Amino acid sequence: MKVLVTGGCGYIGSHTCVMLLEAGYDVIIVDNLCNSKRDVVDKIKEITGKDVIFYKGDVCDYALINKIFSHHDIVAVLHFAGLKAVGESVLKPLLYYRNNIDSTLNLLEVMTKYNCKNIVFSSSATVYGAPKTLPIKESAPLSTTNPYGSTKLYIEGILRDVYEADKNWNIAILRYFNPIGAHKSGLIGENPNGIPNNLMPYIIKVATKELEVLNIFGDDYDTPDGTGVRDYIHIIDLAKGHIKALDKVLSGSGIVCYNLGTGHGYSVLELVKTFEKVNNVKVNYRIAPRREGDIAACYADPTYAFQELGWKAELGIEDMCRDAYNYVMKCKRNTSD
Ligand code: NAD
Ligand code: UD1
């Protein structure tokens, strides 16, 4: 059974491709490589021993998506392609609306044309805005504070409208919490260029001495140690959640929406200390002012995904810290060889 994975060379997409291949699916990737590299395709093959079909191109390109569907009998799409940097989205909102929304509209139009009406969409916990109650259930009120988050919320709305108009669609909206970690092999993972925005890549760059010090954004939040609390989830658990969601979609789910998180919140300091312990490295940090737009705490109620999909996260924060560091160290060794 062939599935199309948009953004399959990216961080979450690549790990999900591995799981899809291991589950017996045939995988076609389309990615314009705006935030990833071509060699990820080879790494996926190296891990799984299986081939994938790769198209380099933009999901906003109707002719290309049409060509892919005309060449292959695709049963479902996992739609990861999108831009995801919150700060950049504030500076370049049109880029984000154009890329994230246009690509989705294109895809849905071509899928309709070829009568492929099964899709798994990458949404985000960012659609919960500043949550009023914790842990967060799927039924919590939705709002966003930046254009990136708005693209996710609008796309969720588009998907609901598409389903209302045609109940033959099966749509899983997955709201991810904070994915970190990497595949055990150290062949795929997350290693952004430049100065990272997110916590784990920043910790790693301080541990490897590429950056001098981690700024901890605020220690005066209403949390146990005053630093921000998030629901970090191992990328492998997240990828497994996609296989379960895809199975659900293919069984005729209608439209469904699941939180993919662990249900446990860890503070910035807890993550830093765990990282230091499991990797036996020092992470210099200092307390800095709060980052604008940040919330004190955010963690999932993942009960619904467990009830409906039989999925729950299994790996712990120690695995996340160890695997994330292992991947970056392996990248470094390979580039210095
Ligand atoms: P990523 O940037 O690593 O992967 C996205 C991939 O999509 C990249 O390979 C990029 O080259 C590709 N891409 C972007 N726009 C494209 C287009 N128009 N056409 C073709 N390819 C395109 O990001 P990720 O962390 O793997 O995230 C995947 C999805 O999950 C995104 O939609 C993101 O918004 C969402 N998400 C990510 C997180 C997170 O913390 N990583 C959290 C919540 C939601
Ligand atoms: C951020 C995005 C969110 C997106 C998610 C995953 C913002 C406001 N939110 O979430 O929309 O879905 O990434 O891509 O950007 N921290 C530090 N120092 C740092 C970096 C982070 O102390 O250098 C703290 C933050 O204040 C926060 C925690 O670490 O408490 C996690 O931050 P981050 O990894 O950026 O994720 P989120 O803010 O949860």
Image (tube, rainbow, N blue to C red):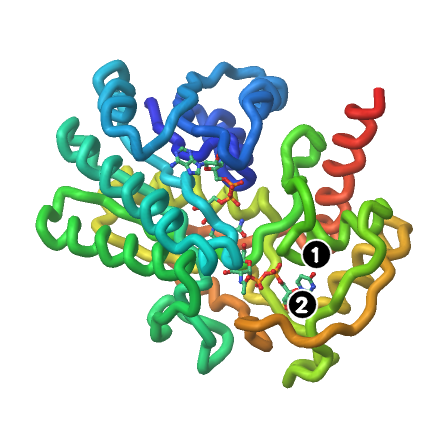
Q: Which residue lies at the image location 24% right of the left edge and 29% below the top edge?
A: 62
Whether residue 19 can be seen here: no
Label 2 sits on residue: 266
Against 276, is 23 above or below?
above
2 and 1 marks in contact (CB < 8 Å)? yes
The percent coordinates of residue 306 (x first, y second) are 44, 57
Q: What element carries label 2?
A: strand
* Amino acid type, residue under disc 1 in the picture: Ile
Q: In which quarter of the image is residue 267?
A: bottom right
Cα separation between marks 2 and 1: 9 Å
Against 64, is 134 above or below?
below
Residue 4 shown left or right of residue 199 in the figure? left
The percent coordinates of residue 212 (x first, y second) are 84, 55
Q: Residues within 10 Å of mark 2 (few under 14, many from 20)?
A: some
Front one among 232 and 220: 220
Q: Is mark 2 within 8 Å of ligand 2?
A: no
* Farthest front residue in view: 91
Q: Is mark 1 on a helix, strand or loop?
A: helix
Q: Which residue lies at the image location 57% right of the left edge and 72% below the top edge?
A: 292
Q: In which quarter of the image is residue 78?
A: top left
Label 1 sits on residue: 317
